[in-house]
Image (cartoon, rainbow, N blue to C red):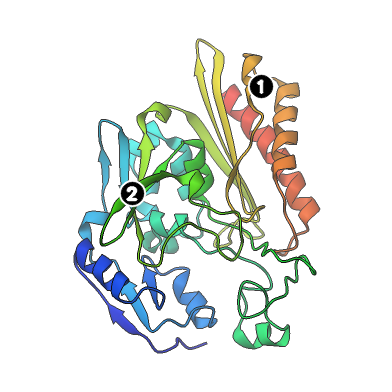
Amino acid sequence: MSLPDFRLSRPRNLPDALAYLTDHAGNVRVLAGGTDLIPSMRQKLFEPEHVLDLRQIQQLKEIRETEQGIEIGALTTLHEIEHSALLRELYPVLVDAARTVASPLIRHMGTIGGNVCLDTRCLWYNQSLSWRKSCGFCIKKDGDLCHVAPGGTKCWAAFSADTPPALLCLNAEIEIASATATRQIPLRDFYTGEGDDYRRLQPSELVTKVILPRSRSGYRGTYRKLRVRGSIDYPLAGVAVVVKRSSGHIDDIQIALTAVNPAPVLVEGLTALMNRGQIDESTADHAGELAARTAKPLTTSALTPEYRRETIRVFTKRTLLALIES
């Protein structure tokens, strides 16, 4: 599958990149690592006239400690996050999630900004042009039918990135810049919950950094994912869990899911678990049930929704118990 024709721009600073994005808004795609964009362009899912390559912009490639916490430039690679001693010490769940992404080669290319902005995926969408044409296309691209939920008007393509659930558990924020303004929003407000229009980002805007608050530093956590193969594959169900303990008691628990909804989501209703002070088999079972009820998997991937929902329940229980025991 060949790439469509396009004009490539490689600015060396952020103002030039934002100006180019403004000039060609609506007909340009942003390339960070390219590990998702290039395959999608080969499948003719995107056929932009312009591609904006950000990889020469050095100011977007640093991990920096501030009074507020840690700032991670959007072009910081997943490999750099995986091997950051600072992040391993303060925010281990993010490092754990980054190290599960695909293969070492892809982690050397893929970026945290690209992972946060990853396009939603579906069996009926991530296919070649001829395959999609034979099925009459879908709501997400060129058609008006959802093959996952026929008769519905909503796209249920699943959000399948690994780092966002970890970032949600850490109450992360992101910085979004345009040629005229810069804003900072909680990551949880970035996603719409719609498979086809899945993020709140204007055509003239870029995600420029991820901000981890100091208030969540020191939380112990880990991330588990379900995939058919032990490397390369996107998650078909993923769970991030973080716990804060003091004097043997549980002060806070955060659980977030990926690959089972059109957006990464936090599990609600965990306050009752914290009120018990301790986590045992019964409370871990309850957390698993809450997570399973939060998950809304449909037939967007190769495994059945029932199996993926049950995996969420089991992963949540096992992960929580393992964190407490350690």
User: To which residue does mark 1 refer?
Assistant: 273
Estimate how packed mark 2 is, as few (under 14), some (14 to 19) or many (20 or more) residues with alpha carbons within 10 Å: few
Identify which residue is drawn at 47% across, 42% down.
167
Judge whether 168 appears above or below 59 on screen: above
Q: Secondary structure at mark 1?
A: helix
The percent coordinates of residue 299 (x first, y second) are 75, 63
* Dot 1 or dot 2, earlier in sequence: 2
The residue under label 2 is which amino acid type? Answer: Arg
- In the rendered structure, the answer to whether residue 256 lies left or right of residue 186 reads right
Query: Disc 1 marks which amino acid?
Result: Leu
Q: Position of residue 69 (x, y in %)?
A: 32, 33
Distance (Cα) linking label 1 and label 2: 35 Å
User: Disc 1 or disc 2, which is closer to the eye?
Assistant: 2
Residue 183: assigned label: 2
Q: Residue furthest front?
A: 180
234 or 201, which is in the foreground? 201
Residue at (46% x, 36% y) in the render: 171
Looking at the image, is 223 positioned above or below residue 276? Answer: below
Q: Position of residue 199 (x, y in %)?
A: 50, 58
Task: Give the residue displayed 49% in from the left and 78% down from the top.
Answer: 46
Which residue does the image show at 38% across and 66% down from the upper left?
33
Q: Is residue 24 above or below residue 185?
A: below
Quarter where residue 114 is shown:
bottom left
Task: Give the percent coordinates (x, y) of residue 52.
Answer: 32, 73
